[in-house]
Image (tube, helix red, strand yellow):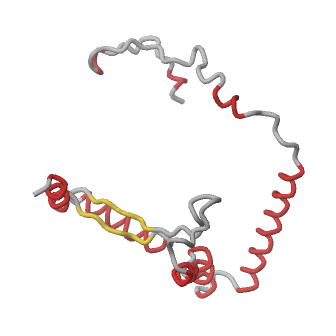
Amino acid sequence: MSMIWQMETLADSLYKDRKIRGFCHLPCCPLLGHGKEYVQAGKGPLVYEYTTYRFAGHSMSDPGTAYRSRDELKTERANNPISSFRDKQIDWGVFTEDQAKSVDRSVREMTSKEVAEAEKSPESELKAEVLFQDIYVRGSELNQWRGRTIDETDYSGYSMNILV
């Protein structure tokens, strides 16, 4: 029996895990409440794994269609959390279809204005090498003497405003 297999087998007895579809926050809230009660009742640790879906590829050179079918993409797009939540709010009467369209329109207009302003702005003269300059700033170090243990560490003269 391999050590990895033994560890995987024993892991189930150490903690419980739950897989949650992280595409919508609504079912997540009661599950988190249940988890809090479960742990506070002393039943042990609980691990949540949130599953989501990435619509785009990993990078510009990865179109994201080589390893998944168009049907899979179409199915996942039907479960898009933004449009699904919008539709639920309309169904619940939070706002009407016209109000939702108005919000969409105003967000698109605001985004277009911001993009246009960013494109008009002059390109920064800063180069990549500035990322590696002035990393250490004198006087930013903590005023302490480190001991062998936390009890032996001397914090005298330690400025509390560094922590704020």
Q: Is residue 152 above or below residue 119?
A: above
The quadrant in which the C terminus is found is: top right
Q: Is residue 133 above or below residue 105?
A: above
Tell me how many marks there are. 0
Q: Residue at x 32, y 63 (%)?
A: 35
| 71 sits to left or right of 10 | right
Q: Residue at x 66, y 24 (%)?
A: 133
How far across and how far down the image is residue 114, in percent?
A: 82, 57
How far across and how far down the image is residue 127, in percent?
A: 75, 33
Q: Is residue 156 above or below residue 3?
A: above
| 148 sits to left or right of 10 | right
How far across and how far down the image is residue 92, in percent?
A: 58, 85
| 149 sits to left or right of 51 | left
Q: Residue at x 17, y 59 (%)?
A: 5
How far across and how far down the image is residue 21, in percent?
A: 43, 72
Quarter occupied by residue 54: bottom right
Q: Residue at x 51, y 28 (%)?
A: 163
| 126 sits to left or right of 77 | right
